[in-house]
Every structure is written in structure tokens, then in C-alpha cells.
Image (cartoon, rainbow, N blue to C red):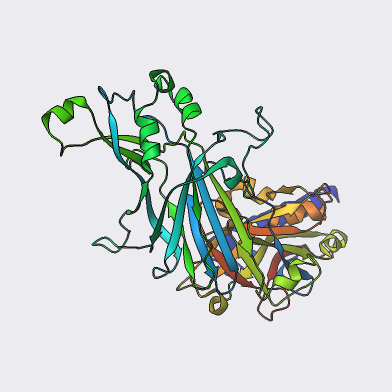
Amino acid sequence: MKAKSRNKYFILLIVMFLTSFVFTHCKKYDDLGMEILPSTDLISVKNTILKDDIRAYTIREDSIRTDGASKSLFGSFNDPVFGNTTIDFATQFRLVGYPDFGEAPEADSIFLYLYYKKIFGDTVTTQKIRVYELEESLYADQEEGTGDNTSYPYYQNVGLKGMASDQLLGELDFVPQITLDSTETDTFYQVIKVPLDISLGDKLVNADSADMVSNDDFLNYFKGLYIETERITDDQGAILSLEAASDNSFQGSALLVYYNNEEIRNITTDTLLSMPYIVTEFSARVNHIEHDYSGTPFFGSLSNPGMVEDSLIYIQTTGGLESKIDIDNLSLWRDSVNTAINRAELVFQVDTTVSDLENYPAPSQLLLTYIDSTGQEFLPKDYSFSPAFYGGVLDTLDYTYRFNVTQHLQQIIDGEVGNLGFNLTTATKNSEAKRVVLKGSTSETGIQLIITYSKFLQQ
């Protein structure tokens, strides 16, 4: 009897492998491999779709970190579905070398150059930018809970305006632009050129040599700039992804001081020299982000998180919105004897009409995390097995986000982790402006948990 039992479980493992292979590579529900099973040992491979046990709610995401993002965001945008988002920006500027201005230098003019390639919104709304000098230092590359300054790491509610002088250095009205290159596969760099008050040019040109010995000394002398955007109230607007930091292929955003000196003045009065101060990967770069959801279709449910189910759920980057997902009765599978989970896939359907994907591209990937007994979030075991296997990437054939949670579901069944719900949010949070509307748990074609399992039938 023991040998026969071992043979049965060996056969069960073969079927589990073959079934997983079929669903992973072919996405077909068929009987591949079943012909190799002895007729005396019957294993039934089935699939079931759970919908009624799933509940989903739109909630505010916890405040996100905004320091050191790959792209720095800036602008104000009135989304027709998601309300207003307004983002300010602060950054350090670093020396490219020891500045040698010559004898008796005089600043002629100074400009702030901000580069960008992508926007989220329109290209017709005028936006206003205002620039102030920082009076408090920013700090780069600070880990959670380290350092002497309690203000970092920096989160989206950081008070950048309170860290800056109230003296306006410059302001500019501009309209964002996007120009495709000749292949129409990429966009050219666009630039915002902001003229600044000559007082800042004088400060940089006349800096003491001791203040320019190193970047640390310089950053203590000139702490950087706070760049404020005026909130759009009537029109739509846009959020820009700034190409702030320099890299191997691009110089990054910069300050440029134009000046002359005694040597130049003795030759001509028409020639000017220039000195750049650049934003590098080592520069602290921080965003302040505000969301106003008043007037949105989900505003009322945000006041009662986890209480109001809707036919739609809303997901947004920039520390905006996420969804809380509860799936009831998963532990009941523990009572199903002789059953093994071959595949469990959680599927979210994009509402392409409300999302308006043509004008507002959806996030390329979402992130599904589970919640433990302390309220902390963790990635499911399936992600550790293989991020590609775990999924979450937007499938543009049927506009779904699919997550493989096979191993996580097995852990719930085995009692290794609790079933306290999931959070669905964006994979990229602080370097792009994106959002998407998904069909919720009360929608007819909403969230589905597709479970494929093998059941050994006792004789």
C-alpha cells in the first residue's frame, strides 16, 4: 500500500508539472500529458474562476519617497477623472571643476535650463514657473532612518517652500512642447529657459575661493533652487518628466552664468564667457506632490477607506491612489484533500473607455503586494521565483494586468501566511505621471481569480 501511495503522488507531481507548462507557454486548457497516466489512477485537472469572493476598494496610497528619482516631475495637471495634481521641484547644482573667473569678474546674466522629453497632459495650457534660492540644505543618498537631519528621506509632503527664501529670483510663463524625431519613435529634448535675477549671478561669480574648493563646500555656500509651479485651476495642464540629472549621453539641467572679466573688457565689450553649474546623479533632487480629489467620482469613498465597493477602481502614480483587494474563503481550500494548486492567476481588466488610453497612457506595470499581520506589505513568493513569472505587465492585446500568485495561494492554503488582503499599485511611483481605471469587483467583467488545480480521486 505504501508503494502504491508513493506512485500515486509521483504521478500527481508529473501532472502538476505538465499542467503548469501548458498554461505558462500555451495558455490552453487541454489534456496534454493525461494519456501517460495509468487508467487505474485517475487525476482530474480542473479550473475554477472566483469572482464573488473578491472585494476591491480605491484608497489613498501612503506617502511615497520623492528623492533621487530617475526623472524629476514638475507641473500642474487637472485630470478629467483623477482631479488635480501639482508638483514642485528642488535640486542641488554642482561644480564641473574649480571655477576660474579671472580678474575682476562681473556677472552679465544668469539662466536656469530645465530639459524634458515627456509630458502627461496637454500641450496647449500655459503654466507658470517661479524660482527661489534654497536656504536649507538638501541631502542626497540618505537611507531610511540614517543621518543627523530628521527631514530625510524625503517624502511627497516635504515642505520645500519653507526651505527656500521668499525672494523671487525669476518667473516664466511657458507652454509645454513635444516634438518627435524623424523616425517618430522618440522625442527631442525640450528646454525651459528661465532668466534669473542677476543677484544670483553676482553671488556665484564673487564666491570666495574657499567656497569652491570642493562640491561639499560649494553646496554649503549655494544650497540649490526651489522651483515652484502655479496650480492650474481652469484649464487642463500637464506634468513634465524633467531630464534633470546628467548621464553619459546628456548633460542634464543646469544653471549658466554669463560674465566678463578685466581681460575680456580690455579687448571687447561684446564677448561674454559662461560658467555652468549642473545637476548630476549625485545631486539631491526632491519633489513635493499634492493631490486634490474633490469633485472626482471616487472622492466620497476616500473618506471611508475599505467601506465602499465600486464597479471601478482607480490606480495612480505619484503617491496618489491604489486599490485594496480582499479575497475571502481562500483558506477553505485547505479542507480540499488530495488537491494541489497548479496555477492561480489574478486578472484585472482595464476600463479602456474611462481610462482614455489614447490621451492618457496606462502604467506599463502594476505591483501586487500582500499584507501581513503587522500591516506591512511584501511581494508574493511568486515574484522571488521569477519577476516575469509573477507578471503585472500591461497586456495590450486584451488590456489586462495578470498576476501569477500560485505559490502565494499555496502558502495561504498551507497556513504559512495569512489571508489579510492585497494592495494593487503602480510599479513606478515617483518618476512618471500615469494612471489607469480598472473594472472593480462589482463589475460584471471585473476582477477574476482563475485557479487551475489537480485533484486525485481515491478508488
Residue in the image at 69% along x and 71% along y: 448
- Image quadrant in which the C terminus is located: bottom right
Q: Tell me which corner region of the image, top left, top right, bottom left or bottom right, holds residue 299.
A: bottom right
407 vs 312: above or below: above
**Residue 71 visible to the viewer:** no
In the image: residue 40, left or right of residue 138: right
- Judge left or right: residue 130 versus residue 438: left
Q: Position of residue 427 (x, y in %)?
A: 58, 54
Q: Residue furthest left?
A: 267
Residue 327 picture location, percent across and down: 78, 65
Give the number of callouts.
Answer: 0
- Name which residue lies at 57% across and 53% down: 429
Q: How far across and how far down the image is residue 397, in percent?
A: 49, 72
Return the residue nearer the eye: 35 or 248. 248
Taking depth in this image into account, of 151 and 272 the one nearest to the observer is 272
425 to 114, vertically: above or below: below
Q: Is residue 114 above or below residue 330?
A: above
Vertically, is 43 above or below 407? Answer: below
Q: Quadrant of residue 325?
A: bottom right
